[in-house]
Amino acid sequence: MNIAVVLPGWVGDAVMATPALRALRSHFAGARIIGVVKSYVAGVLSGGDWFDELLLMEGVAATAWALRRRRIDLAVLFPNSFRSALTAWLGGCKRRVGYARYWRSPLLTDALQPVRGSDRQPLPSPILDAYNKLAEHVGCPPPGWRMELDTTPDDEAAAARVCDRAGFAACAEVVCLNPGAAFGAAKHWPTPYFAELARDLAERRGAGILVLCGPAERDLAREVVTTACHPRVRALSDLAPLSLGLTKALVRRCDLLVTTDSGPRHFAAAFNRPVVTLFGPTHTAWTETYHPHAIHLQKRLDCGPCQRRVCPLGHHRCMRELTPAEVFDAAARLLRGRKGSAA
C-alpha cells in the first residue's frame, strides 16, 4: 500500500501533525508512506522516521505527476487548501481524505466536516485535534496529544558549539527568546520589550540568553541584543549558520523558551521544555497543544483576537499592553517549577 501524507505549510502546524503521523506510521506498518512537504518545512521533520520518502512540493503539476508515478492508494491531506486537494486529485490518488473547506469537497473521496459554530463558520478549535481526527478516520487508534521531534547528530554538535561560543557554561540557566513570527507584524512583541526581558533574566536570574532567528530575522535578533546591552545576551545569527535543525537542537537544550505564537513554540512542547507564549491577534484555541509546562499570555481586548497579519486599527495594543514585567513573572514561575521537578 502506498500512502501520501500532505504536510502543513507552517512550521508549527507540521509539529502539531506529529501525533497523527506517528499513528499513521504505526497503523500502516507495512505501507510505504511518502511525506509531501514544502522545502522550508522539511527541516522540521529531519531525524524522524515517519516516512519512507520525502517528496518536495514543486508546483501542482510537477507534484501531481510525481504522485501518479508512485501509484498512491491513500492521500491524507493535512492542509485545508484547494491546492492540496487538486494536487492529490490530479495525482491519481485513489482515496483522498481531508476537510471540507474552500470549495474542495468534490476533489475529495472523504470530506470531513470541521468544527463549526452556530453561524456555520469554522469555530476556533485545536488544529492538533483536527489532525488527529484525520488519522482516526482512516482507521488509526486515537493518536493522543504527545507531539514529538527528533534532532540529528550534526545539529546536536552545532548546538553544543553555539552554547560554548556564547559562554553559557557557567550560567545558572539558558533561556531562548524567539521574537520573530512569519505570520505577520501583528504577532510581534515590541523589540525594546524583548530587550528588557533579556536583560532582566540575565541580571536577576544569572541566565544566558540566546535570541533565536531565521534568515529573515537576523536584524531583529541583533537589535534585541544591542538594546539589551548585556554580555550574556547573544544572537544565534552571530554564532552559527542558521537552520531549523539547529534551532530544534537549541530549544531541546534550553531551560525555557519565550516566544511569539510561531513555529519554535511547538518545538518546546515536542521536547517537553517550558514555554511562555505571547499571544496577540491570534486565538489561543487554534494552536492549543495541551502542553503541561506552558503559559499563554494574552490581553483580552474588544478588538481581538482579530486573526489579522497587521493590526487593522494601527495601535497594536494586544502586544504593546503585555509588559516585560508580566512576561518575566511567567518565565520565573516556569523556571522555578523546572528546578523543583529536577530536585
Image (cartoon, grey):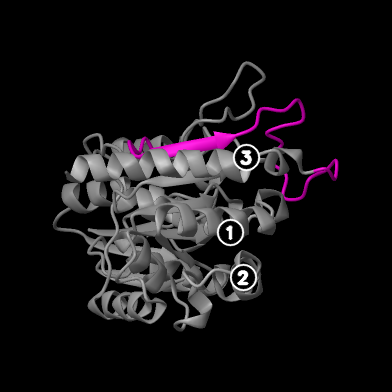
Q: What residue is shown at x 39% (from left), y 65% (from top)?
A: 44
Q: Where is 297 relative to 64, above or below? A: above
Quarter of the image where one finds residue 131? top left
- Does residue 197 appear to the left or right of 49 in the view shown? right
Element under disc 3 = loop
Taking depth in this image into account, of 267 and 144 the one nearest to the observer is: 267
Overall secondary structure of the magenta stretch?
Answer: loop
Q: Which residue is mark 2?
A: 217
Spot occupied by residue 273 in the image (x, y as percentages of width and height): 32, 50
Rendered location of residue 164, percent (x, y): 33, 79
Q: Label 1 is placed on what type of residue?
A: Pro
Judge by depth and name the residue closer to the eye, 33 or 157. 157
Q: Are marks 2 and 1 in contact (CB under 8 Å)?
A: yes
Q: Read off the residue under disc 3.
A: 282
* SS class, disc 1: loop
Residue type of the residue flagged with mark 3: Thr
* Element at label 2: helix
Q: Name the residue type under label 2.
A: Glu
Residue 172 in sight from this viewpoint? yes
Q: Say if residue 181 shows up in the picture.
A: no
Q: Which residues are magenta?
A: 288-315
Judge whether residue 303 is colored magenta. yes
**How much space separates mark 2 and mark 1, taking CA atoms?**
8 Å
Disc number lying in front (3 or 2): 2
The disc label shown at residue 179, or none: 1
Q: Residue at x 53, y 53 (%)?
A: 200
Q: Is residue 324 magenta?
A: no
Label 2: few (<14), some or many (≥20) within 10 Å? some
